[in-house]
Image (spheres, helix red, strand yellow):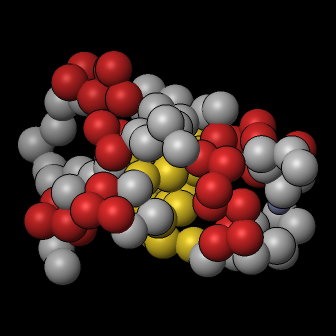
Amino acid sequence: MKKHCCRAFEHHFNQAGKYGVSIIFTNLSEKAIFMQQFRMVDKENESSIVSDNLLRIATQLVINYCPWCGRKLSKQVKHYGGLDRNDLRIGFEKLGT
Ligand SMILES: [Zn+2]
């Protein structure tokens, strides 16, 4: 069985940490979560953004289904061992929750 449900999901999974839309997988505290993440700039360039106003340069939302093909993501979670990108996860405190 393929790791990713579809080519669009694979493409966005490989964009993790880059500007635009991407998919992040994290398995922190034994709870597998897929997130769709939206970034203004690449993660490595975040510090280059300077503003007098409060900016949110990245945001994310937990997803249970593939946004492109609609498949349930929990069915493919077993293929994601070792692909944790918790380093890219936006802390909940920054989301104001
Ligand atoms: Zn898909």
Q: Position of residue 26 (x, y in %)?
A: 42, 53
Left or right: where does residue 33 sit relative to residue 67? left
Give me the residue at 49% from left, 36% from top: 82
Name the image quarter holding the C terminus.
Answer: bottom left
Q: Nearer the viewer, residue 3 or 35?
A: 3
The picture quadrant where one finds residue 67 is: bottom right
Split into quadrants, the picture shows ligand 1 in the one at bottom right
Q: Nearer the viewer, residue 72 or 58?
A: 72
Give me the residue at 17% from left, 38% from top: 51
Q: Position of residue 91 (x, y in %)?
A: 20, 57
Give me the residue at 62% from left, 60% from top: 77
Q: Nearer the viewer, residue 82 or 26?
A: 82
Give me the residue at 72% from left, 70% from top: 75
Q: Is residue 38 visible?
A: no
Q: Position of residue 14 (x, y in %)?
A: 65, 32
Q: Is residue 47 above or below residue 57?
A: above
